[in-house]
Amino acid sequence: MPQGTLCRALPVQNEEELKELLADTGGKKYYAEMQELDVNADKLAATLQKTLKSRLRTWLNICAKCGMCAESCFLYRIHNRDPKQVPAYKIQTTLGEIVRRNGKVDNKFMQHCMYTAWAKCTCCNRCGTYCPHGIDMGVMFGYLRGLLFSQGFVPWELKIGSGMHRVYRAQMNVTEEDWVETCEWMAEEQQEEYPLLEIPVDKEGADIMYTCNAREPKHYPEDIAEMAILFHIAGEDWTVPSKGWEQTSLSMFAGDWEACTMQVKEVYDAMERLKPKRMVGTECGHAHRATVIEGPYWAGREDGLPPVPCQHYVEWLAEALRLGKIKIDPAKRIKEPYTIQDSCNYVRNHGIKKAVREVMSYLADPSYYRPMEPDLEHNYCCGGGGGFNGIGMYRKERNFALMTKRDQILATGAKLVIAPCHNCWDAIRDLEEHFAIGIRWSFLKPLVVHAAIIPEHLKPQEEEEMEEEA
């Protein structure tokens, strides 16, 4: 049974293996080894027997192939309505075949499945909204990805991503020390303008425990600073955990179910250790899905809920503005047309539909709002969800997939796109780089920080005032 040194059925076991994968630029050796990778049919059959439960078996069997899912799929629409892009066709010719053959498939077929699972579906779950039987192809493709991962057929970048979670408990190589030092650095950077600002680490019993996306300490530390400024202005009692701070799960995109469980348990352990009243997670869609929606089931929690109540950051922002904890300077409100990109993962999949619009009602006059068509839970994927953004081998397909979002944005006439999700933010950045349509894009944090009124008691004291007080 040929197994490569880089491409193989086993997941990444340690930092050394991870570094070997990272050194394989572009996955050249990895994909060459994949051409020779054998399929362990007995193991695949055993996995099906153990994990393919009644819901997925029923969905495979009751699909009437009516085609109602076709128009719901943005990839079907942009490929000139190619029948091979119909969601039902895609899943029946991959997962359906694996089940019908009871795992007796070969390398070529598994590579076909890999391409379909990662380049022809973003697991946006939009098709499930329109299926008359309630069949959700996104869920089924998520399961298919798990089967493929277990046999070693996974894109190189996502093998690395799940390996990062296994080694560092973060999607990037950010250690506990790196994280804490970044928090200290960001707090110090802000203390000239906000003298009392702190980023409390491992404070027990705080009202809020904040978790984020590892990209923030790794590439966008200003996001951490903006979060701290807004909690500071709002007067919140909050903390970040030294361990369990990373909320995302590239292992979910990879289909590495074991790493999904490892990752979310790290976050839940932090909740149980620090005992916050609630957790607030950053502006990231899949992080919310992994920790709040899917996570409880990965962790085996019988109530289907995280250990403490959880909010997406947009929910906390809406609450803070509604309660007057943060006030907006009218002179700094946005005075240009804007549109909103609704994240599949927390809008369609968790019903958080109103929060972003409520936040924007404080930041701009409603007359400036230009909704996408369709929007809210019916909105299309940004074009790069489900890991599509990060797979170099499928970059051409991903760029083609961005056309739907490009056309939606252009139709609004707005030049400013509000994108409170890391994945959507990346996709919209990339579509601007690729198509150059002249737009800007933003998370909510920097917009609110810019427009927020700093309470007098939080402003730096002038030297004379300090002398008088002394």
Image (cartoon, helix red, strand yellow):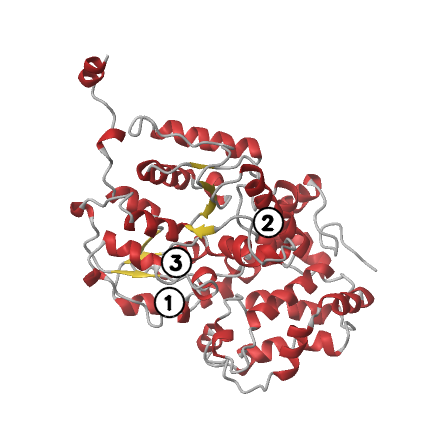
x, y percent for residue 103: 77, 71
Q: Is residue 428 left or right of residue 139?
A: left
- Image check: 379 left or right of 358? right
Residue 234 rendering spot, x and y as whole percentages: 32, 40
Q: How many C-alpha atoms fall within 10 Å of the one at disc 1: few (<14), some, or many (≥20)?
A: many
Quarter in which the C terminus is drawn? top left
Q: Quadrant of the N terminus?
A: bottom right
Is residue 24 visible in the rendered image? The answer is no
Residue 232: % across, % down: 34, 35
SS at mark 2 in the image: helix
Amino acid at the residue labelled 2: Val
Using the rendered image of the protein, determine whether residue 409 is visible from the camera's viewpoint: yes
First in residue order: circle 3 vs circle 2: 2
Q: Is residue 82 above or below residue 74?
A: below
- Marks 3, 2: nearer the viewer: 2
Residue topped by disc 2: 264
- Please tell me which residue is depicted at 39% across the width and 58% down the height of the picture: 428
**Horizontal side of residue 166 vs 292, given as left or right:** right
Work out whether 118 lies above or below 223: below
Which residue is tagged 3?
Answer: 428
Q: In the rendered structure, which amino acid carries the disc numbered 3?
A: Ile
User: CA gap, disc 2 to disc 1?
Assistant: 27 Å
Q: Which residue is mark 1?
A: 376
Q: Nearer the viewer, residue 272 or 84?
A: 272
Judged by depth in the image, the label closer to the viewer, 3 or 1, is 1
Q: Earlier in the sequence, mark 3 or mark 1?
A: 1
What's the residue at 58%, 42% (across, down)? 272
Q: Residues within 10 Å of mark 2 (few under 14, many from 20)?
A: many
As displayed, is residue 131 above or below residue 321?
Answer: below
Residue type pointed to by label 1: Leu
